[in-house]
Image (tube, rainbow, N blue to C red):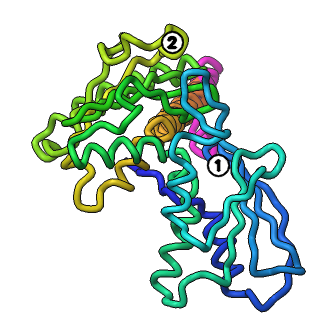
Amino acid sequence: MILLQSHSRILIETLSNRVQNLDKAVELDYNWVEFGDIRYHVQVSAKNPNVLLLSVSLPVPPPETVFVGGLPYGAIEAIKSAYGSVVQILDPPRDGFNLTLKINLAKLPTDEERKQALLMKIASVREVVLGAPLSVVLKHLLSRTVAPGLDGLLALVHRPNESFFLFPQAERVTVVYPMRFSDSVDTTYAASFLQEFVETRRTAGLTSAPVCSWSPDPPPELKEASAEPLSANAGFVSFVIYPRHVEGGKLDRTVWNLSTFYAYVSYHVKCTEAFMHTRMRRRVEGMIQVIHSLILFMFILHLFLETLIDGKLNLVFLDLP
């Protein structure tokens, strides 16, 4: 199975190109969308080619999620910690966006390895911003504590007007995803995929992976949630995260994998659907070939019977192509 990359390929290519051509005065001004819900805007002025303005528009949060100043809980602190003095948060952001960052490319580290690492981190701004509240919760899990003010059921945005839930405890954090799909075929594929996903977790080689479960009904952790977020037509997936899953430098990867789990499932559902369509097309093509062969056989047989009836049996039909 394919895991999604945390960085934006378009953004890392843009940043790398600008770093390699800082002496060239160019103007950039363009938008793009990733994951179907994250919109980016990059702007560079020819008058100040060392400065790149990056604006990010996040999914529309549902009412149950915690947003502070248009951003997820802890996002401002996460940005400052990740980027330091290289990045400045502009207030207010660009119209139509949740966040605008002023990136001073002249302040990047001179060491090439550190420079590339920071550029990659900037290109992973989606992970830093949307994963901020999850990162706060999992950092406290490392110390076997619960973050102050985050000791109840938490709702985090991951798609427009849709959320997933955290139930933090001192020794573990339970993550629950209500899985929704607008297409009935996608819903069927997703339910089957998730049940197989849970069964695969039980194999001998994956005993250290987080405990995973699937249910068509809401798990007990969501008893405090309102009815609207629990309208899931493909069931509910739960992961139980223990301290060992975020120790030894695993925190960032765990945050990213949990933040993009729905996109991961949706990607494989679409791949499965495409694979099934390809198989069906091949099968239909094979049946059409059989039918064509049968039509040719019946045509030859018809000619043979006609010559028999006329008493003029010959081998002319052997010359047929």
How far from the left and from the top, in percent, is residue 84? 54, 69
- Residue depicted at 62% across the width and 42% down the height: 71
Q: Residue furthest top?
A: 227
- Residue depicted at 56% across the width and 72% down the height: 119
Give the Cα separation between the discs numbered 2 and 1. Answer: 25 Å
- Is 22 positioned to the left or the right of 27 in the image? left
Which quarter of the figure has residue 55?
bottom right
Reading the image, the residue beneath label 2 is 231
Task: Say which amino acid is labelled 1.
Answer: Glu
Residue 44 seen in the figure: yes
Residue 109 versus residue 193 in the image, above or below: below
Reading the image, the residue beneath label 1 is 34
How far from the left and from the top, in percent, is residue 191? 40, 22
Residue 207 versus residue 303 in the image, above or below: below
* Pick the front one: 258 or 314: 258
Which quarter of the figure has residue 19?
bottom right
How far from the left and from the top, in percent, is residue 307? 62, 25
Read off the magenta span.
302-321
- Residue depicted at 49% across the width and 62% down the height: 81
Q: Is residue 51 magenta?
A: no
Q: Identify the element where label 2 is drawn.
A: loop
Q: Identify the element where label 1 is drawn.
A: strand
